[in-house]
Amino acid sequence: MNNNPSFPHDDNILARFFGRSSNYTDIPNQLFKEHNVKKGLRNEDGTGVRVGLTKVCDVIGYTKDEEGNVIPCEGDLIYRGYSIRDLLKNRQHNCGYEETVFLLLFGYLPDRTEFANFRKSLSDRYDLPADFLTNDILRNPSRNLMNKLQSCTISLYNYAPDPDAQDTYQTLLKGLDLVAKFPSIGCYSYFAKMHHFYRQSLIIHYPRPEYSIAENILYMLRTDGKFTDQEASVLDALLLIHAEHGGGNNSTFTNVVMGSTGTDLYSAICGSIGSLKGPKHGGANISVNKMMQQIIADTKYSCDETLIRSIVDRILDKDYYDNSGLIYGFGHAVYTLSDPRCELLRSLCKKLAEEQGCLERYAFYEKFESIVKEMVCERRGKPICANVDYYSGFAYTMLGIPEDLFTPLFAIARIAGWVAHNIENKMYDGKIMRPATKYIGEHLPYADMKIR
């Protein structure tokens, strides 16, 4: 008897149908090469297949020689021509993310007057529509905040004066509205979940117009609304670092593909959120955090090299943690010698650890990173770098941000890049994106049901 009311009549019948089917057997890798199909949109050397042109962002992780061989190099991330190192170093006080949003959307850095007007334009959009908090968030909480962010995004479609408008200016206005409202939606959705499912106190702080987005997130998340300047600076840096990462990452590519059909911005952003939710994309920092919790429980923050090397050996031998053989937070599809986002986060984490008195934990992270890079290089014969996810979870933890919000915060930051690429595609392309696949199945004669 089936006890699940959501599926009233399956009784494993569909599972038997699925098991009988021969159409879900593995497609051998050699067939991809034989038919010149780029599996996973990757070239044979692991680099991504180029599917478009962009002026928004450049991700630099390697060069190629005359024969086309990949040459590892130090990584850099370029927003509209500017290195994130320079943007982070010279950012406005706790408003680096807002300046980055302006740069990504308009293509140049603002002067003082432009930036003040832009910040005012964003803060004017902080508040959610009337009754949205009650009707769309508190009355219908979700166990997964990324799913809730999706449902709230599509609900905002109903509040837009012309939600299906496709011109770039209207897309820009809708995008700014989402940038301004995502922080409140994320924070309120978290408290609604904790209140409804775990009977915790419901905390609602309305965003303050004089605060930056980073400051408002900390203010809304904390019962007393208090935070230090260093904490706000680190969160602002995290938002800036996560704001954009080229047109080839999965969630941005999803947005551009959906946007190319002429669908509304809200639907395209929902597609991006769904993509980012995946543990192979935006959810990776949670995987890192869980792995490090286990390692720290077993090592007690010991920086003993022999102990750490034994754990790394066991992970690589699929004999530790989840037995996957993966060391989460290391390796990247583009970056080879270094991920610039990780390099920047490492130094920011050290400053925050000094303020919060947890340098022992920081030292362990730094030591573990060094040993992993050395040992993986020894085993595989090529360099590996720590990626942005390795330190981002550590930074969020020091900021007191719950794990439930790690990936939503990624989306809260990345909405800027998604909107920038959506607008760019409308301006310079306009064609529906339509990739092709190669059919390798059989061609069969139809048989009447009574003789099958």
Image (cartoon, rainbow, N blue to C red):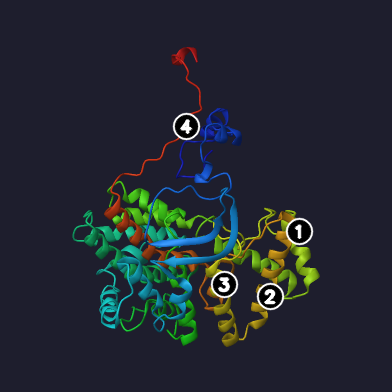
In this rendering, position of residue 288 left or right of residue 321 = left
Total labels: the figure holds 4
Marks 2 and 1 sit apart, C-alpha to C-alpha, by: 18 Å
Instruction: Name the residue at 74% across, 69% down.
Output: 298
Res. 343 mark: 3
Q: Which mark is residue 364?
A: 2
Q: Earlier in the sequence, mark 3 or mark 4?
A: 3
Contact, CB < 8 Å: mark 2 with mark 4? no
Considering only vertical position in the picture, is 15 above or below 195? Answer: above
> Any mark on residue 314, and which?
1
The answer to which quarter of the image holds residue 347 is bottom right
Instruction: Identify residue for label 4.
Output: 438
Q: Position of residue 307 (x, y in %)?
A: 79, 69
Amino acid type, residue under disc 4 in the picture: Lys
| Callout 1 amino acid | Arg
Closer to the camera: disc 2 or disc 3? 3
